[in-house]
Amino acid sequence: MRVRNWLFGHFRDVARSFGFEEFDAPVLESEELYVRKAGEEITTQLYNFEDKGARRVALRPELTPSFARLIMQQGKSLALPAKWFAVGQCWRYERMTRGRRREHYQWNMDIVGVEGVEAEAELLAAITDFFTRLGITSADVGIKVSSRKVLQAVLRRFDVPDDSFAPVCVVVDKIEKLPREKVVEELAALGVKEAAIDGILDAMAMRSIDQLESLLGADADAVSDLKLLFSHAEAYGYRDWLVFDASVVRGLSYYTGVVFEGFDRAGELRAICGGGRYDKLLGALGGEDRPMVGFGFGDAVIMELVKDKGLLPESLKSGNVDDLVYPMNAALRPAAMGIAARLRAAGRSVDLVIEDGKKPKWAFKHAERCGASRVVLIGEKEWEQGVVRVKDLATREETDVKPEDLC
Ligand SMILES: OCc1cccc(Br)n1
């Protein structure tokens, strides 16, 4: 919990520094919120079941559909742009033999109502700020950026029907994970013709926006969007984190524009985070479309990176109590309770020793365990003189202090 609170504390500090409002949503939702036909892994692993009221329900595998549902419920009253964040537990049903977790926590930040890539630029700034707070640099981690409009333009060139777009994206997302022939096989199974498959794979191999421009032309949306986004990145100062990579399409079917994913440059870990623009999700859920952009940032891969790089603060090895209050005998316990109450009222975090028979040696050992900066000993002689003995654990200094001067 110390590690989780440290990590989530950074999630929340970044969200606050970007002026985002926190939301929450039920971990249990109607199954239909996640039923999508594009063959995404996240829907094939749905943790779903029938409840005692014969309702088809599911533990949420992601936060975005719940977010979209809440935005729809706000209707016209929602002031735009809306900038919301959440840190929520998400579930999937996996065979445990794969040794992967069935639950994780995910930080989400989403912006509703901004058509331009300025929304994506803000979210990428939040992600790079978060990494920086942890001590992770652009030498450790990069963010691959592209746009699904690249694939959309290529599919249109080869007359691939629009309703194949989402399933094709789900297959193309596996390009780095599957052998080429498997990707070709899955695209063919979607009815994509051989020439189109070659065109798709050639386009996905592009690694520069100049290449992209020569393929699609300077006035293509994908080109102008990405050029503007990279120039915004210069303005924020995080340009060196970004890498254009046309093969990035992300595995969620609802993305429609810019997409991005954080990766470790050593190439040892799965994607650290990911997100993108999804302008048609509200329509797909029965509402009125609004421009939306967001990302999800799970707590598992980032913790592998933090541990690999030794970035966990030493302070997490102990608790974060300020004072250990220790009566030297049971008769002095009421005095100790009064001292503890006074310190707590002043905002100090106090661990009061409430068991009899604890020796001073135990008290000092316990003080170290709970990270106390002071031990406040209530001794018979001192208490009769109206003082308590305070030991500063950093300087090892001991002083007698009147209760009213303790803080
Ligand atoms: O990243 C996909 C995902 C969804 C739910 C639970 C876990 Br663990 N992982």
Image (cartoon, helix red, strand yellow):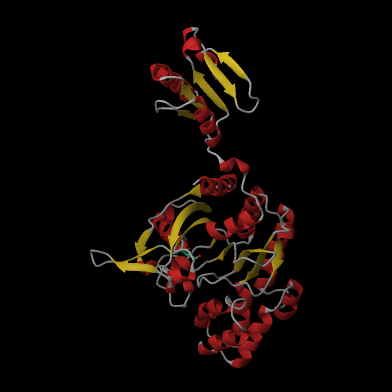
Task: Name the residue at the left extreme.
Answer: 53
Q: Residue at x 69, y 79 (%)?
A: 205
How many badges with numbers are in the image? 0
Residue 181: percent from left, percent from top: 60, 88
Task: Name the residue at the bottom extreme.
Answer: 194
Looking at this view, is 185 or 94 the one in front? 94
In the displayed structure, 400 sits above or below 308; it is: above
Res. 112 visible in picture:
no
Q: Quadrant of residue 397?
A: top right
From the viewer's perspective, tell me whether residue 143 is left or right of residue 256.
right
Res. 261 visible in picture:
yes
Looking at this view, is 157 or 304 the one in front? 304
Looking at this view, is 198 or 323 the one in front? 323
Quadrant location of the C terminus in the rendered image: top right
Q: Quadrant of residue 144?
A: bottom right
Residue 372: percent from left, percent from top: 55, 31
From the viewer's perspective, tell me whether residue 300 is left or right of residue 128.
left
Residue 320: percent from left, percent from top: 54, 36
Looking at this view, is 4 or 161 the one in front? 4
In the displayed structure, 194 sits above or below 109; it is: below
From the viewer's perspective, tell me whether residue 347 is left or right of residue 184.
left
Residue 293: percent from left, percent from top: 55, 61
Q: Residue at x 50, y 28 (%)?
A: 363
Q: Residue at x 53, y 36 (%)?
A: 369
Task: Name the residue at the top extreme.
Answer: 385
